[in-house]
Image (tube, rainbow, N blue to C red):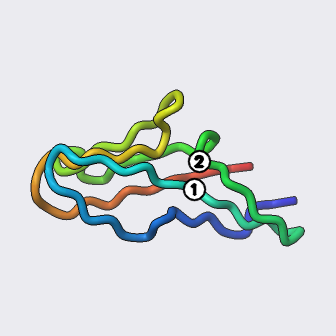
Amino acid sequence: PTVRSLEVMPGAVTLEAGQDRLLRAVANFSDGTIRDVTAQAAWLSAQPMIAIVSDSGATKGKVEAKQTGTAIISASYRG
């Protein structure tokens, strides 16, 4: 099956500087199955001065706020 959509959950998070939160990447496949692909996804922060996201090991998807502001965190998965 192919990936039809990928959703980062939760969709929005509010954190204070120094706080962290684990996000999940959930893939919806062409055969109707839904699977957590957090560990297989590639994670990226578009604003790493504001928030960073782990892309390795057991902490994949873990976001840490560095300072006040808004950051876009994304995940990609090819299946």
Residue at image point 85% right, 71% down: 32
Between discs 1 and 2, the one toward the N terminus:
1
| Local crowd size for mark 1, using a 10 Å CA cut-off: few (<14), some (14–19), many (≥20) | many
Image coords of residue 79 (percent x, y): 74, 49
Residue at image point 63% right, 60% down: 26
* 32 relative position to 51: left or right: right
* 20 relative position to 50: left or right: right
> In the image shown, does 63 or 3 lie closer to the viewer?
63
Q: What residue type is labelled 1?
A: Ala
Labels 1 & 2 near each other (Cβ < 8 A): yes
Image coords of residue 58 (percent x, y): 53, 31
Q: Residue furthest left?
A: 68
SS of the residue under disc 2: loop
Cα–Cα span, label 1 and label 2: 5 Å
Disc assigned to residue 38 = 2
Residue at numbered disc 1? 25
Residue at image point 57% right, 56% down: 25
Image coords of residue 72 (percent x, y): 32, 61
